[in-house]
Amino acid sequence: MDNNIIKIIFFGDIVGKPGRTAVRDFLSDNKEKYDFVIANIENASHGFGLTEKNYNEFIEYGIDAMTCGNHIWDKKDIYSYIDNADKLIRPINYPNGVKGVGSRIFEKNGVKIGVINSIGRVFMNMVDSPWEIVKDEIAKIKEITPIVVMDFHAEATAEKICFAKYCSELGMSAFLGTHTHVQTADESIINGMAYITDAGFCGASDGVIGMEYNTSLSRFLTGIPERYEVAQGKTTQVNALEVDIDVNSGCALAVKRVFCSNSKIEESGDEN
């Protein structure tokens, strides 16, 4: 690590075993390039939620911080381990009393990095408004470190853009959109803050945003709910964002999209 710059990589939503495998292989080849690794893991275990087993595997892969979203509660064992999972953050704007925490300050190579997870309200299940909550949390973190990164898990592009501009005025270092699983081509630096509307997803390339095509097609053709299955296929893709941040000011210096494909999916009987 350059003494004055920390290089962070953020992986968009990891979907099922294909996504876990793709991220594992990417980090095996590239982990030394990065000082801090963050990933959204809310779809990591068979497409919905996160098991404790997969949580521990991500730590072995070299992931330093894990964010999530509305699907984090889908695997019921989350309730038994979330309070002890010191690398996992759930959305901060769930009501008081919900298990887990919405932000953490991590330390890597002597540098403190604040990470916040928040969830949107437009076209999403209703939760508390994130605006004042995140404003207060940024102020608390900046008393300890100038580096503040947020995963904003939201559906509406306008909500993401407006909230990002608001956060840039509060001194945030990086604002990373997730949830829609399609990487947007609008990476930029706003008032010293790295930004992307959606970082994309990590998973099978042959499905529909990581899910199996035929099931998705049936739902659209019939309107009848049907259980989604994680897509398989021959290739995977990794969508991520690289951000260089000045460790003294907390300002983003560079931002770069990562997209790579054609990783082989392992044939295995293990869970998706």
Image: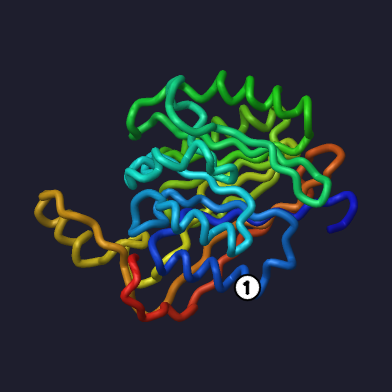
- Residue 27 vs 118, above or below: the answer is below
Residue in view at x 53 percent, y 40 percent: 84
Structural crowding at the residue carrying mark 1, measured as other residues with C-alpha within 10 Å and reported as few (<14), some (14–19) or many (≥20)? few
The quarter in which the C terminus is drawn is bottom left
Residue labelled with disc 1? 28
Q: Secondary structure at mark 1?
A: helix
Residue in view at x 55 percent, y 68 percent: 24
- Position of residue 222 measured from the top left corner of the image (x, y, whole percent): 9, 54
The quarter in which the N terminus is drawn is bottom right
- Position of residue 178 measured from the top left corner of the image (x, y, whole percent): 48, 47
Quadrant of res 268: bottom left
Left/right placement of residue 141 relative to residue 118 reads: right
- Residue 144 vs 247, above or below: the answer is above
Residue in view at x 14 percent, y 60 percent: 218
- Position of residue 228 measured from the top left corner of the image (x, y, whole percent): 24, 57
Q: Amino acid at mark 1?
A: Ser
- Position of residue 34 measured from the top left corner of the image (x, y, whole percent): 72, 61
Q: Is residue 159 visible?
A: no
Q: Of 17 and 6, which appears nearest the observer? A: 17
Quadrant of res 189: top right
- Residue 131 vs 187, above or below: the answer is above
Left/right placement of residue 42 relative to residue 88 reads: left
Residue in view at x 40 percent, y 43 percent: 78
- Residue 180 vs 217, above or below: the answer is above
Left/right placement of residue 76 relative to residue 108 reads: left
Q: Is residue 60 visible?
A: yes
